[in-house]
Amino acid sequence: MLDSSDTSKIDNSQIPVLQPMEFGGILDSALSLYRNNFRFFLAIIAIYIVWIGLQEAVVVWLLERYGIPNFDHLWLLERYNTPNFNSLVFDVDDLLDNLVYMLFVGVFVVVSSEIYLGRRLTFRGALQQFRSRFLTYLGSSLLFLIPHRILIVDSIEIPIRGAFFLLSLSFLCVFYISWIFYGPAVLLEGFTVMEAFGRSRILVRGTWMRVCSITLAIFLLEIGIYYVLGSSLGVVFALLGILQEGSLMEIIGNLLRLKYVDIRPISLDSLIMYIVYLGWDAFTLPIYAIGITLLYYDLRIRKEGFDLEMRVRNS
């Protein structure tokens, strides 16, 4: 763990600082930045794991206390005839999970930016910079998440949701890409909530397909690494007999399924799988934040001459 007052030895020697990057260059630079500064990112990952672990422990305690089945999907709730109120518990928990995820993405954006620009960086300094913009970033993150949550919320009946789901999903996809740089706009440029979304649209304008393809590639890279790590550890657990429930393929499938289907840890096997999932999920989390940060600076360099601006400042 890093000392909060120590200056981290950041390494961006393999990253093309302040110059436009192509599709593959952004992905390669994201991995290089993460690998070269893994010790610094690990300190933040540890906080994320503890936070989510404690949150899930509270949820499991509530499930046990009130006798709510250990599922968070509507069709499972209906199958076990649980009241619709119970799905509200899971919806709130899912919203908190997503919000915590976005908050830590914000911390990683700040860290990635400082490393990319070659500035001196401390653990305490990164947290203080994030804290100074916390409320604005929290508000913009909630606005960013609300449309997505409305589509998948289980506790509120929306008659037209099923009929227009695909159309709504396409609509959200367009705005998701258009608003994707709201975080850097708030944290790195100091914009307000609504200004940040407008700023993001300006950066994306005219390059929507490129931003979409690179963002998708970053997602696939993050998910691919998670699946490779999860499958490998699933094989090890199955061969060593650490997990007793199910065959080899069932164990691997359960580990991978936890990425999208949340079954709370109430048995030893499910607890082990959940710890593995949480560790790998946290391990891959910085990849998305770093990639988006590099793409953000790439757009600023291409559209606004940010590299020239920084050279003038430094001189």
Image: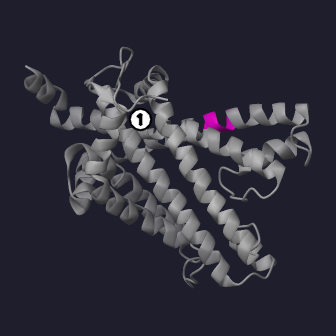
Instruction: Give the x, y percent position of residue 22.
Output: 37, 27
Residue 259, position in %: x, y?
66, 49
Left or right for 239, reference 45: right
Among the 4 quarters of the image, the one containing residue 82:
bottom right
Quarter of the image holding residue 86? Answer: bottom right
Quadrant of residue 165 within the rendered picture = bottom right
In the rendered image, is residue 294 in sight?
no
Q: Which residue is mark 1?
A: 290
The colour scheme used here is: one colour
Residue at horizontal 91 percent and vertical 36 percent from the top: 241
Q: Main secondary structure of the magenta part?
A: helix
On whether residue 227 falls in the magenta region, the answer is yes
Tell me the amino acid under the disc marked 1.
Answer: Ile
Residue 77 showing in the rendered view: yes
102 vs 171: above or below: above
Identified at 69% across, 44% down, the residue is 275
Rendered view: 265 above or below 208: below
Q: Is residue 180 left or right of residue 307?
A: right
Frontmost residue, 115 versus 220 = 115
Q: Give the magenta-colored segment's residue range.
A: 224-228
Q: Would residue 18 be counted in the magenta stretch?
A: no
